């Protein structure tokens, strides 16, 4: 299950609160690892492409690694892969956007879709208040116009979203951090939605009396056709290139030695590179054979 919504709406907080209730693993976006993020908020036009490419590769790597959790338990994530394209089309322009789109399509083909996307909806005033409350240094000068533009993009995305079942939750009047009832209401609606996903027809959940329904369930439809295999192989190649870069970084940083005698960070980087190389070979129908 993936929880989505605009910056500040409470995605990560909700996942952390729901994780013990569902006895699930959690996958949290590593936004603080992006070295371009603070520069991006200071000058979006200049740093948009670098910021977005880093996020794209980081999210792709996380999604590929998440399969190990799914073999053991349910998995709750505070984002889904399609958000990357939403942000890119808001911030990146021209030839850089065309390049991004080609790379995104190559990687997105191999990312598993969630069983359910939960969209936390909130007005811009609510979002700005929550951003100010958490007080992250690089968000202190957050542009209200940017948050409003981002909110509109999310609204447009989910207005026509058909890739997976979708549960929309109005959060303006909720406080699931301090009010256990709000958190339990969300949990119960999610459980009801998950239990009904495989039914032939999915009725809308009963709405509340506000102008906008507090809960809305969107049924799943068949995904669009797959892109060609050569773009899939390109995605493996790009992931491999990133993994090789991590190997170089591990070697230069001289990380601590693990119990098997190999540097721990280097060992991790080598495992990722090996896994990606095997995937690329299988995609290209090439036998690696014996070492040369």
Image: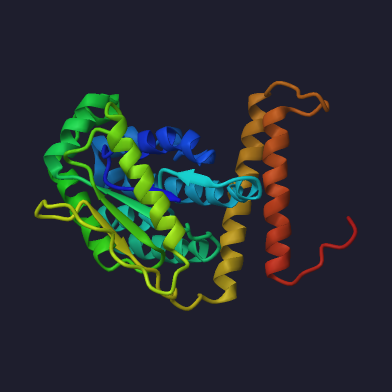
At 56% across and 61% down in the image, what residue appears?
235
Image vertical order of residue 130 relative to residue 159, above or below? above
Task: Report if residue 84 is visible in the image.
Answer: no
- Indicate the position of residue 213 as horizontal and vertical percent values: 18, 55
User: Tag count in the figure?
Assistant: 0
At 44% across and 64% down in the image, what residue appears?
197
Please state if 25 lies on the left or on the right of 161 as rendered. right
Q: Nearer the viewer, residue 140 or 129?
A: 129
- Indicate the position of residue 163 as horizontal and vertical percent values: 40, 67
Task: Report if residue 19 is visible in the image.
Answer: yes
Q: Nearer the viewer, residue 134 or 20?
A: 20
- Indicate the position of residue 78 as horizontal and vertical percent values: 41, 43
The quadrant holding residue 220 is bottom left
Looking at the picture, the colour scheme in use is rainbow
Q: Nearer the viewer, residue 263 or 195?
A: 195
At 46% across and 66% down in the image, what residue appears?
105
At 30% across and 39% down in the image, what residue appears?
40
Q: Nearer the viewer, residue 3 or 85?
A: 3
Question: Farthest left residue?
Answer: 211
If the image is split into quadrants, where does the C terminus sit?
A: bottom right
Image vertical order of residue 32 relative to residue 234, above or below? above
Image vertical order of residue 106 relative to residue 137, above or below? below
Question: Farthest top residue?
Answer: 256
């Amino acid at each position: 299950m993936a929880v989505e919504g605009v910056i500040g709406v409470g995605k990560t907080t909700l996942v952390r609160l729901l994780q013990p209730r569902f006895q699930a693993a959690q996958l949290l976006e590593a936004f603080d690892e992006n070295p371009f993020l603070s520069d991006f908020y200071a000058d979006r036009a200049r740093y948009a492409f670098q910021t977005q490419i880093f996020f794209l590769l980081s999210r792709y790597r996380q999604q590929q690694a998440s399969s190990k959790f799914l073999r053991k338990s349910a998995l709750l994530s505070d984002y889904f892969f399609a958000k990357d394209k939403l942000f890119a089309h808001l911030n990146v322009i021209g030839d850089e956007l065309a390049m991004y789109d080609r790379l995104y399509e190559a990687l997105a083909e191999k990312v598993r879709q969630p069983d359910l996307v939960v969209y936390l909806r909130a007005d811009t005033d609510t979002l700005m208040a929550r951003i100010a409350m958490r007080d992250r240094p690089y968000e202190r000068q957050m542009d209200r116009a940017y948050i409003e533009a981002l909110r509109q993009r999310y609204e447009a995305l989910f207005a026509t979203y058909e890739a997976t079942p979708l549960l929309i939750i109005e959060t303006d009047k909720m406080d699931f951090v301090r009010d256990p009832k709000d958190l339990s209401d969300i949990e119960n609606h999610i459980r009801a939605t998950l239990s009904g996903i495989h039914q032939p027809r999915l009725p809308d959940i009963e709405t509340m009396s506000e102008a906008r329904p507090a809960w809305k369930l969107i049924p799943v439809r068949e995904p669009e056709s797959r892109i060609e295999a050569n773009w899939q192989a390109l995605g493996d190649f790009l992931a491999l290139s990133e993994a090789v870069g991590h190997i170089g970084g591990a070697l230069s940083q001289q990380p601590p030695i693990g119990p098997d005698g190999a540097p721990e960070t280097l060992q991790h980087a080598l495992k990722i590179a090996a896994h990606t190389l095997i995937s690329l070979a299988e995609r290209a129908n090439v036998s690696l054979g014996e070492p040369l």
